Amino acid sequence: MTPQLLEHVRAEALFVSDVQSSESLSVQRIRTAVMVTVRRHGPRGCAALVAHEFGEHPDTAVSRMGWVLRQVRLAYA
């Protein structure tokens, strides 16, 4: 798996996790949320859930994905 693909999987997992942008997050909290969500849904399941959210709520999904990508890049620097 390439580093870019791994970043995408992590971002999709964090996107569909129960983590909220209003939380004060630690690196450990982000990594745990990613791990638990990937184990629960698998990479393809996470991608499908992200696609669903973008279809149902495009107005909020875009800003959440931007936030998620920033968090993933900080946690896995």
Image: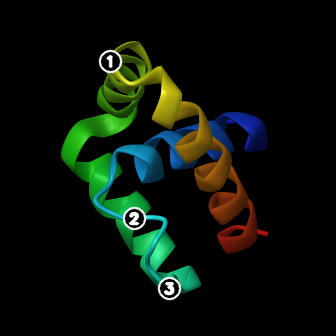
- Few, some or many residues within 10 Å of mark 2 (<14, 14–19, 20+): some
Provide the secondary structure element on which disc 3 rests.
loop
Q: Nearer the viewer, residue 61 or 15?
A: 61
The residue under label 1 is 56
Q: Nearer the viewer, residue 46 or 58?
A: 58
- Few, some or many residues within 10 Å of mark 3 (<14, 14–19, 20+): few
Q: How many marks?
A: 3
**Residue 24 shows which numbered tag?**
3
Q: Residue at x 64, y 60 (%)?
A: 72
> Is residue 59 rendered to the left or right of residue 38?
right
Q: Residue at x 48, y 36 (%)?
A: 60
Provide the secondary structure element on which disc 1 rests.
helix
Gap in angstroms between the C-alphas marked 2 and 1 = 18 Å
Residue type beneath disc 2: Gln
The mark nearer the N terminus, 1 or 3, is 3
**Residue 20 shows which numbered tag?**
2
> Is residue 7 rendered to the left or right of residue 38?
right
**Residue 21 shows which numbered tag?**
none
Residue type beneath disc 3: Ser
Gap in angstroms between the C-alphas marked 3 and 2 = 9 Å
Task: State if disc 3 and disc 1 touch (CB < 8 Å).
Answer: no
* Res 1 → quadrant: top right
Q: Return the x and y of residue 45 as percentages of the image width and height.
A: 29, 28
